[in-house]
Image (cartoon, rainbow, N blue to C red):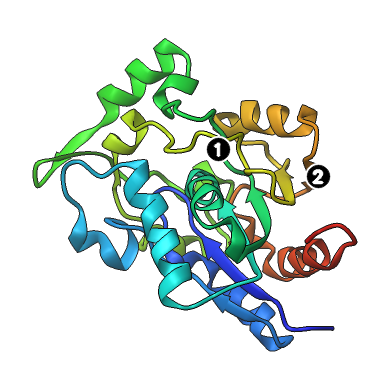
């Protein structure tokens, strides 16, 4: 099996750290893996500032690909990270072999995450925000909200690493003009045990959209923590399938 290049992009509240176990599995079988952290989150939480947007997150991923001189990349976006890989697909499609949306949020070009939610949900989320050094943020939520049982061996490992997520990203339009995925080979992996309500509409859209491969996993939203071996094997299979590049 040929060596593959994986770039794994985390979701909201998380950082590149959440891919530790998947990265270990992939590297053990000879593949290259990088796990960038987006501005203001994870170990880059000291960069939290007003005005962070989906353009910022897109540029985080694009700059990572370019500075690491990566190509033929399997670009994986988990949850909120799906928006970042959609942006990167439009900016640097020549560097990407396959897009994998892992239980990801998907919104239309120019739409905002808030714009994709019902008004009552938006109002509730706005009320839940708190000010952190002048930045309106969602504070970290319990790991159970991501489907990780409280008694899971890595539950506290995840909980103590979660960081606030800036609200400005939810008011920010997705900076693309072409259809999501920009015509690149793309797969949506839906986690179904349990299904996370905030990505249910995105799952339904991807399943019905022509040109998208669809895979279901009986796993929780943070499958990279709870089932890293299974996810790693699936990512390799996706990258090696005929027509995946």
Other residues around mark 1 within 10 Å, as few (<14) / some (14–19) / many (≥20) = many
158 or 203: nearer the eye?
Answer: 203
Label at residue 105: 1
Q: Quadrant of residue 115?
A: top left
* Residue at the right extreme of this rendering: 242
The residue labelled by disc 2 is 213
Q: Is residue 232 visible?
A: yes
In x, y percent, where is residue 41? 32, 57
Label at residue 12: none
Tell whether 222 sits left or right of 131. right
Which marked residue is nearer to the observer: mark 1 or mark 2? 2
Q: Quadrant of the C terminus?
A: bottom right
Q: Is residue 129 above or below residue 49?
A: above
Name the residue: 77% across, 69% down.
236
237 or 132: nearer the eye?
Answer: 237
In x, y percent, where is residue 204? 72, 27
226 or 64: nearer the eye?
Answer: 64
Name the residue: 50% across, 43% down.
83
Other residues around mark 2 within 10 Å, as few (<14) / some (14–19) / many (≥20) = some
Tell whether 66 sits left or right of 189. left
């Amino acid at each position: 099996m040929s060596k593959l290049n994986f770039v794994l992009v985390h979701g909201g509240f998380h950082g590149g750290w959440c891919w530790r176990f998947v990265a270990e599995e992939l590297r053990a079988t000879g593949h290259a893996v990088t796990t960038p952290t987006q501005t203001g989150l994870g170990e880059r939480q000291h960069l939290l500032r007003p005005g962070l947007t989906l353009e910022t997150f897109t540029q985080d991923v694009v700059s990572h690909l370019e500075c690491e001189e990566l190509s033929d990349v399997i670009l994986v976006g988990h949850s909120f990270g799906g928006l970042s890989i959609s942006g990167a697909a439009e900016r640097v499609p020549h560097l990407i072999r396959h897009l994998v949306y892992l239980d990801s949020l998907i919104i239309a070009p120019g739409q905002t995450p808030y714009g994709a939610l019902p008004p009552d949900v938006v109002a509730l989320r706005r009320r839940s925000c708190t000010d952190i050094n002048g930045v309106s943020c969602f504070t970290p939520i319990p790991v159970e909200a991501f489907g990780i049982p409280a008694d899971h061996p890595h539950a506290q490992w995840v909980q103590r690493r979660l960081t606030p997520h800036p609200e400005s990203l939810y008011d920010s339009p997705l900076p693309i003009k072409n259809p999501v995925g920009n015509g690149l080979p793309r797969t949506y992996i839906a986690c179904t045990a349990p299904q996370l309500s905030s990505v249910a509409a995105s799952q339904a859209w991807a399943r019905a959209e022509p040109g998208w491969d669809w895979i279901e996993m009986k796993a929780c939203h943070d499958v990279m923590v709870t089932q890293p071996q299974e996810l790693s094997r699936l990512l390799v299979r996706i990258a090696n399938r005929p027509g995946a590049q």
